[in-house]
Image (spheres, helix red, strand yellow):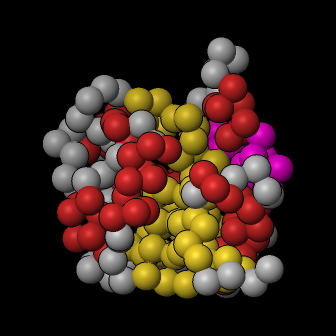
Amino acid sequence: MEMKLINAEVLNDRIYKDMKKQFPPEELKSFNAINDLLTGGKYKLDLLIINGHDAGYILYYKSDFLWIDYIAILPEYQSCGLGSKVLQLFFDKYKMLKGCYFEVEKENPQDKNTIRRVKFYKRNGCEVLDFKYYFPNDVKLLEMDLYYKNLSGVLPAKTRILEDIEEIFGCLHVQTQSCMEILELIKKENKCGS
């Protein structure tokens, strides 16, 4: 089985249709917003290709750190261990960077999917950060856990986490009307000042 990650310039309809099935509406950017971000330089789309066919995708922001916006394996390729393999390919590709952040729904004992996701990130070497985080959206205040995969040997301090979040909010979430209010709430709850 030949498996590789390739960079794509634009989001295609097939991938976006899958995103609409796999991600809650309050977490999903519009098709046009994603393609606009892809033209900005720091927002990237990597496709997982297996034997010449799309099998999954990662949409992410790249600076001196990585911020995963969306990661998924297409349904016909799920339950084959590809999620871990694609993460390893991704981490190998960017091993020279500091680390990688993931916004993860809080674990809910009544929701098997949240339990499965948390186990997936932990199994792949990600640590939950001791940092109060809210996902920026205009639907509702959505508290999430912030996970981090250390690629450099050093976990970020709270001040560095906040700097990275400010950079992300300024790029990925600028279209969210409540973005700045949510950022101020994050600063306040983590006692990082204004």
Q: Which residue of the protein is positioned furthest toward the top in this rendering?
A: 110
Q: Which residue is at the front of the view, 140 or 36?
A: 36
Residue 189, can we see it? no
Occupied quadrant, residue 118: top right
Identify the residue at image location x=42%, y=36%: 24
Q: Which residue is at the front of the view, 10 or 104?
A: 10
Identify the residue at image location x=71%, y=30%: 115
Question: In the picture shown, does residue 162 fall above or below 82?
Answer: above
Residue 77, can we see it? yes
Q: Which residue is at the front of the view, 118 or 99?
A: 118
Question: In the picture shown, does residue 174 fall above or below 94?
Answer: above
* Residue 9 image offset from top left, x and y in percent: 36, 83
Occupied quadrant, residue 182: top left
User: Quadrant of the image for the C terminus?
Assistant: top left
User: Quadrant of the image for the N terminus?
Assistant: bottom right
* Residue 183 image offset from top left, x and y in percent: 33, 43
Does 162 sit left or right of 83 as displayed?
A: left
Does 111 sit left or right of 42 as displayed?
A: right
* Residue 40 image offset from top left, x and y in percent: 27, 79
Magenta segment, which residues? 119-130
Does 154 sit left or right of 182 as displayed?
A: right
* Residue 54 image offset from top left, x and y in percent: 55, 72
Identify the residue at image location x=33%, y=64%: 13
Q: How many numbered discs sit on the rendered protein?
A: 0
Question: In the picture shown, does residue 47 fall above or below 96?
Answer: above
Residue 38 in magenta stretch: no
Identify the residue at image location x=47%, y=67%: 60
Does 40 sit left or right of 15 as displayed?
A: left
Residue 126 in magenta stretch: yes
